[in-house]
Image (tube, grey):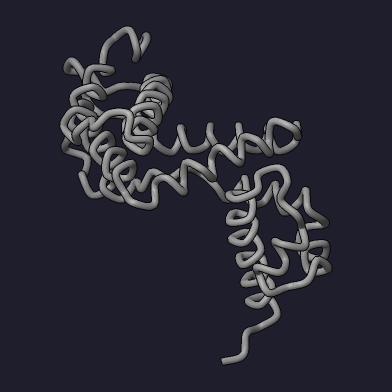
Amino acid sequence: MRLTRAESKAANKRALIDAAREVVGRQGAQARLEDIADLAGLTTGAVYSLFGGKNGLMVAMVDDYVGPLDLRPIEAAGPGLTLEEVVAVIARQFWRMSADPEAAGQLLFEIRVMDLVLADPDLLAKLNAAINAAEVQLATHLTGREYGGTPITREQAVRLARALKALLSGLGQGVVLGGHGGSEEYFADVARALVTRQVLGPA
């Protein structure tokens, strides 16, 4: 079936973003536009036409990357769970993600992205925006959950989401690198320990 012009444009954008992610994962800030275009099966002219150049493609790649956490298990958990129970679901999902055989490649990509964005203020701002958006998205699954007999506010949920993401990312790196063999239940126990008034802050 022949693609429409809009479908072809979207497919080419997707191919270039995926190729950029793979090349950046290998080469970091040394990633060459020619290598990205070649991997995508397109020309460098397509990059300029679709993204305005290499920097535009890098911005799109960083914007496309919102973090590896799959929120579907959290969504499937339903609204009836307490805050501690939902936090445990998140932690177990993070453990499964970290124990996945492909997690080492994901970690390498994240390291290469940091190498790339620290040299470019525009990319750094875009990455920070993507990280903040991911934390807010995670917080939506915590907002209104009951803790100590009271539903937590959006602001409290964002504070907890930020702490959870930092804690679980660190624990997850340890699993990927083989530094420790923290179990799924250990992740859940440590994450639940974050659910305190000190972390949540005032209502």
Q: In this view, does 69 lie above or below 124?
A: below
Q: Using residue 142 as the reference point, say whether residue 166 is left or right of it.
A: right
Residue 154 seen in the figure: no
Image quadrant of residue 78?
Answer: top left
Q: In this view, does 145 lie above or below 103?
A: above
Q: Which residue lies at the image location 52% right of the left edge and 37% below the top edge? A: 133
Q: Which residue lies at the image location 75% right of the left edge and 31% below the top edge? A: 121
Quadrant showing the C terminus: top left
Q: Which residue lies at the image location 61% right of the left edge and 90% below the top edge? A: 2
Q: Which residue lies at the image location 23% right of the left edge and 34% below the top edge? A: 86
Q: Is residue 188 above or below residue 72?
A: above
Q: Is residue 21 above or below residue 146?
A: below
In the rendered image, residue 85, in percent from the top left (x then y), is placed at: 18, 31
Instruction: Choose between 70 and 22: the one closer to the eye.
Output: 22
Image quadrant of residue 114?
Answer: top right
Residue 197 seen in the figure: yes
In the rendered image, residue 42, in percent from the top left (x then y), is placed at: 73, 73
Quadrant showing the N terminus: bottom right
